[in-house]
Image (tube, helix red, strand yellow):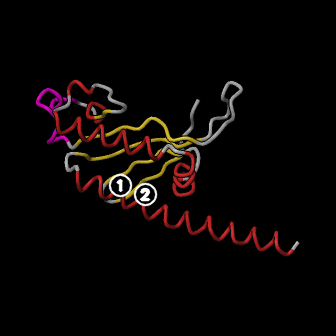
């Protein structure tokens, strides 16, 4: 019995270390992304466990990522937009209106999220930001809000 208890303690300690290091790596990765992509203002995504998944297991996932560019980097046609939503691009939505640099930003963000959606890493996201959350990342940090999904 003592060996099992020791093993459980080691596993718990190991998970804590992974979560701590993982959080540092994830947060610094976002900071690096913003430094390397000065036209990007915000990155927004949701993270939640669905309540129902049509018979499939309900597991936490990262969803609906969006990238928002700083207004001064938006093309002339977009500068006249009334709403902040007009500066939003997610999953290559309206990608045809982006310039080459913005397309590069969007592709790199897409690749980043593909890596983050891997099971072990998304669990660290869940630990950092919580379940049923909408997250807004900027160069200054993160804003986490409750998120209700349908």
Kindly indicate whether the residue at mark 2 contacts the one at mark 1 (C-beta within 8 angstroms). yes
What is the distance, in whole Å, between disc 1 and disc 2 at their CAs?
6 Å
Asked whether 75 falls inside the magenta stretch, the response is: yes
Direction left: furthest residue: 76
Principal secondary structure, stretch drawn in magenta: helix
> Which image quarter holds the C terminus?
top right
Q: In this view, does 14 lie above or below 148?
A: below
Disc 1 element: helix
Q: Quadrant of residue 61?
A: top right
Number of numbered callouts drawn: 2
| Relative vertical location of residue 6 with respect to residue 131 in this rendering, above or below | below
Lateral position of residue 56 relative to residue 84, left or right: right
**Dot 2, crowdedness within 10 Å: few (<14), some or many (≥20)?**
some
Q: Which of 98 and 4 is in front in this view?
A: 4
What residue is shown with label 2?
A: 26
Compared to residue 2, the image places residue 30 above or below, namely above
The N terminus is located in which quarter? bottom right
Q: Whole-percent x and y of residue 148?
A: 57, 37
Residue 82, position in %: x, y? 23, 30
Q: Which mark is residue 106?
A: none
Spot the residue most to the right: 1
User: Is label 2 in a helix, a strand or a loop?
Assistant: helix
The residue drawn where x is 20% and y is 50% is 38
Q: What residue lies at 40% left-to-right and 59% top-to-bottom?
A: 27
Which x, y percent locates residue 88? Answer: 30, 34
Foreground residue, 15 or 99? 15
- Residue at x 28%, y 25% (from the top left corner): 94
Disc sitting over residue 30 in the figure: 1
Q: Nearer the viewer, residue 7 or 72?
A: 7
Q: Residues within 10 Å of mark 1 (few under 14, many from 20)?
A: many
Q: What stretch is highlighted in magenta?
A: 71-81
């Amino acid at each position: 019995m003592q060996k099992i208890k020791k093993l459980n303690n080691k596993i718990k300690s190991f998970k804590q270390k992974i979560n701590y290091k993982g959080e540092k790596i994830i947060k610094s990765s976002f900071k690096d992304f913003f430094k390397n992509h000065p036209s990007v203002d915000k990155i927004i995504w949701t993270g939640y466990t669905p309540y129902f998944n049509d018979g499939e297991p309900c597991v936490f996932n990262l969803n609906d990522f969006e990238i928002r560019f700083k207004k001064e980097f938006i093309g002339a046609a977009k500068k006249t937009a009334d709403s902040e939503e007009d500066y939003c691009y997610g999953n290559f939505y309206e990608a045809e209106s982006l310039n080459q640099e913005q397309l590069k930003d969007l592709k790199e963000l897409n690749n980043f999220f593909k890596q983050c959606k891997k099971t072990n890493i998304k669990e660290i996201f869940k630990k950092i930001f919580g379940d049923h959350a909408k997250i807004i990342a900027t160069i200054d940090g993160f804003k986490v809000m409750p998120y209700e999904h349908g």
